[in-house]
């Protein structure tokens, strides 16, 4: 061995043992010939097999494909710190540090990113396993189950051992009884995927505070702010800042909103709970708000607020009519 920093051991379908790390040559023990073969140095975190004699290398700079016979290494993806990788038919699923999960098609060479915007607990994905049609992802913010067909994400926020920990890089295995074992910063976690049931999040959207033109109106209303259903404003109050809260079993929930009559579509669901609009034109609007679960697969709650912004008197129809009458009168007198 040229280095003591061995980070990965992998046995391929031919029975050969691969040894890799961030320093030194990549080494393969050829079991039938009882000898070692060296390949060019690569900073490796994970080794797996794409097909016979085609070895995938998850490196600190990207994903590489090694031809076992020729020793030629080809870079498939560059610019990513790859923590773990798995190959399923023509697709490679790549765990990255900061870029979420990447889907790479070996035939078309197209890539698709799955991030927190799609429901992942974190963009720092450290480990991956395939079981019963699903991809199980260990992230810095807990475990989740990803469906490659529907692209849906299921998280387990109510189970602390699966949500309140950081999963270690490439630390996982499947036992003969079907249980999955993962390494985390709090020790090893073992569970049967069939035993995990989806817990439907329940909650409501609460109006915590409302600021108009830089001034809170919560204490000046005749009714509780959260009971507000409609709001009438003058033209100088056209800057609105609404603070939201999620009440109930809604760990990791995300908000999305749309000002109907002003916005073209819904905002991207996120953990941001502050709705802010400035310099709104006069008119009648409906502020619609949705509360999603952490996986973005379910809408937990919805509510709306009717907002009317009264135009200044010089923009009203009656003022324009009076102005027109005045102009006509002046012209007539002249």
Image: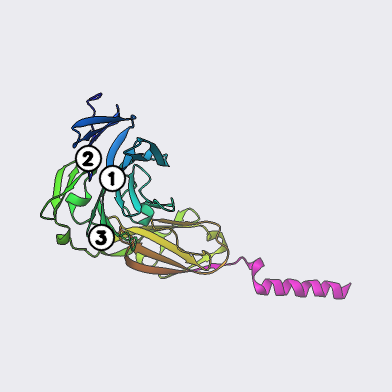
Please say if the residues under marks 2 and 1 sit with CB atoms less than 8 Å apart: yes
Packing grade of label 1 (10 A; few <14, some 14-19, many >=20) is: many
Residue 266: image x %, image y %? 45, 63
- Most distant residue in the left direction: 177
Residue occupied by mark 3: 133
The mark nearer the N terminus, 3 or 2, is: 2
Span shown in magenta: 307-334
Packing grade of label 3 (10 A; few <14, some 14-19, many >=20) is: few
Give the spatial CA distance, label 3 vs label 2. 23 Å
Residue occupied by mark 1: 49
Task: Locate the C terminus by quadrant.
Answer: bottom right
Between tags 3 and 1, which lies in front?
Answer: 1
Residue 5 shows in this picture: yes
The mark nearer the N terminus, 3 or 1, is: 1
Residue occupied by mark 2: 10
Instruction: Assign a secondary structure to mark 1.
Output: strand
Instruction: Assign a secondary structure to mark 2.
Output: strand
Q: Is residue 326 magenta?
A: yes
Q: Is residue 324 magenta?
A: yes
């Amino acid at each position: 061995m040229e280095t003591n920093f061995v980070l990965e051991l992998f046995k391929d379908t031919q029975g050969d043992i691969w040894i890799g790390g961030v320093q030194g040559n990549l080494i393969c023990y050829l079991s039938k010939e009882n000898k070692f073969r060296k390949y060019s140095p690569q900073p490796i975190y994970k080794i797996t097999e794409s097909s016979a004699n085609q070895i995938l290398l998850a490196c600190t700079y990207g994903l590489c494909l090694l031809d076992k016979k020729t020793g030629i290494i080809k870079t498939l993806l560059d610019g990513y710190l790859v923590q773990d990788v798995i190959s399923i038919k023509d697709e490679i699923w790549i765990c990255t540090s900061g870029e979420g999960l990447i889907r790479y098609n070996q035939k078309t060479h197209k890539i698709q990113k799955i991030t927190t915007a799609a429901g992942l607990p974190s963009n720092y994905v450290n480990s991956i396993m395939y079981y019963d049609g699903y991809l199980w992802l260990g992230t810095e913010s807990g475990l989740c189950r990803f469906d490659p067909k529907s692209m849906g994400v299921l998280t387990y926020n109510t189970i602390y051992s699966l949500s309140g920990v950081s999963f270690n890089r490439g630390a996982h295995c499947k036992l003969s009884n079907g249980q999955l074992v993962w390494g985390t910063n709090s020790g090893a976690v073992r569970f049967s995927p069939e035993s995990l049931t989806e817990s439907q999040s329940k909650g409501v959207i609460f109006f915590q505070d409302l600021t108009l033109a830089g001034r809170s109106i919560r204490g000046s209303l005749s009714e509780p702010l959260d009971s507000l259903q409609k709001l009438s404003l003058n033209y100088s109050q056209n800057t609105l800042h609404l603070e939201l809260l999620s009440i109930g079993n809604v760990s990791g929930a995300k908000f999305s909103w749309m000002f109907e009559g002003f916005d073209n579509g819904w905002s991207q669901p996120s953990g941001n709970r502050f709705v802010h609009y400035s310099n709104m034109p006069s008119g009648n609007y409906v502020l619609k708000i949705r509360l999603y679960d952490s996986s973005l697969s379910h809408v937990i709650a919805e509510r709306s607020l009717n907002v009317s912004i009264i135009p200044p008197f010089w923009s009203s129809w009656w003022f324009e009519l009076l102005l027109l009458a005045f102009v006509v009168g002046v012209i007539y007198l002249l």
